[in-house]
Amino acid sequence: MSETTLTGGALPITIRDATKSYGAVFALDNVDLDVRSGEFMTLLGPSGSGKTTLLMVLAGFTRPDYGSVKFGEREIVRTPPHKRDVGMVFQNYALFPHMSVAANVAFPLKLRGVSKQEMVERTEQALETVQLAGYGERRIDQLSGGQRQRVALARAIVFEPRILLMDEPLSALDKKLREQMQIELRRLHDKLGMTTVYVTHDQREALTMSDRIAVINHGRVMQLGTPEEIYERPANRFVADFIGESTFLPVTVQQGVARFGDQSLKVAQMPEAGEDLLLMLRPERLQLITNDSEAADGEANRFEARVREMVYQGDSFLMYTVLENGTEISLRGMTRRDTVSTLPAIGDVIQLALHRDDTVLISAEEP
């Protein structure tokens, strides 16, 4: 398997006005999206958002009602799946249980009329790439979930496709193995260099693996950006609520000053006045004020709250608090000995700080 060939052969993907409806429901609603050559792009969204429909359009299993999809300069909307030169890893792996591991991996080569000797060599190389060297003669039912996932991946890359499509390939794995496979998949992508489009509903998985993320809802791209851009500066409430944990407080802007109730806020980036805005509070960005130096921080916004509940989560804790106006906000901290020893009791009134740079205002309007 030629690493150089894969790297040099990666293709960009250009999607314009892709639309697919089922009755009155739009699975895709005039989607525009550019995937760069060699990029790891994740389509992220809740169930029914349209992310899998978009992947199936790329794979050729679903044809849009209208719109354009190009691989490089080639329009492929009417091209059948087997002529698109894409590797595909399905959610359930879609392996042949009556075939050996090697036969499963070699199947795409057999369909392409590759010689027997070359088929053996490329199959062995693909299995070695996914760390399954020596597993060729095993049956599929003799493999663990993680090993089956690797076989499906080897089958998808064995014919050196220029584009790799993956539909929630890790969803059947337990948490620990899933997290290990995220890192392995990302390393394999970097090694092979092919353009990868990956579908998931798991926010942390998307943040861990992606060059860029397209957050999709109601068949539309809500935001496209790097993991850091999506998390730190969400475009709207849907993105902020879907990526990570957030609480939202209503904010008004008057004469260039943002206010929550009677309290003026220090904000790193002020949006235009007149827009309905929300203050996004992420639990890990809030800080419990426990000494004079923290209380004196002039770059922080302060909130008074009463502790309602504490939840122990092993490496971290969640402290649920209630503001004076009745809004519940939560604070997340690490369970270090020095931190736990200073935690307040249920019912205590506390001061919370949010640094100016973490004070993010987003639009309250539904996209």
Image: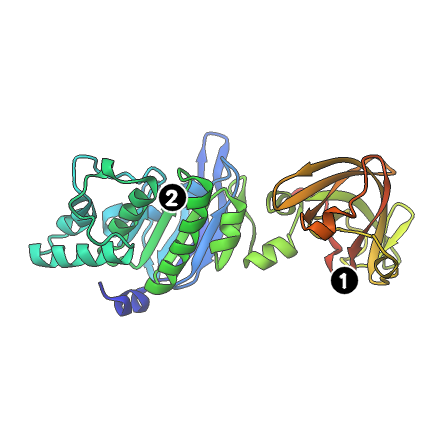
Q: Is residue 219 left or right of residue 71?
A: right
Q: Nearer the viewer, residue 182 or 111?
A: 182
Residue 67 in the image, given as x and y percentages of width and height: 42, 48
Q: Is residue 57 visible?
A: yes
Q: Is residue 309 left or right of residue 9?
A: right
Q: Residue at x 88, y 54 (%)?
A: 264
Q: Residue at x 32, y 41 (%)?
A: 61
Q: Identify the residue under disc 1.
A: 268
Q: What kind of residue is marked 2? A: Pro
| Tag in front: 1 or 2 | 2
Residue at the right extreme of this rendering: 262
Q: Is residue 243 left or right of residue 208?
A: right
- Say which quarter of the image contains residue 319: top right
Q: Identify the residue under disc 2.
A: 169
Q: Residue at x 50, y 54 (%)?
A: 208
Element type at marker 2? Answer: loop
Q: How many neighbours does mark 1 have within 10 angstroms: few (below 14), some (14-19), or many (20 or more)? A: some
Quarter placement of the N terminus: bottom left
**Is the residue under label 2 in contact with that under label 1 (CB below 8 Å)?**
no
Q: Residue at x 34, y 53 (%)?
A: 164
Quarter placement of the C terminus: top right
Q: Is residue 80 visible?
A: no
Residue 86 in the image, given as x and y percentages of width and height: 29, 53
Q: What kind of residue is marked 1? A: Ala
Element type at marker 1? Answer: loop
Q: Nearer the viewer, residue 179 or 152?
A: 179
Residue 108 in the image, given as x and y percentages of width and height: 19, 49
Q: Nearer the viewer, residue 52 or 79?
A: 52
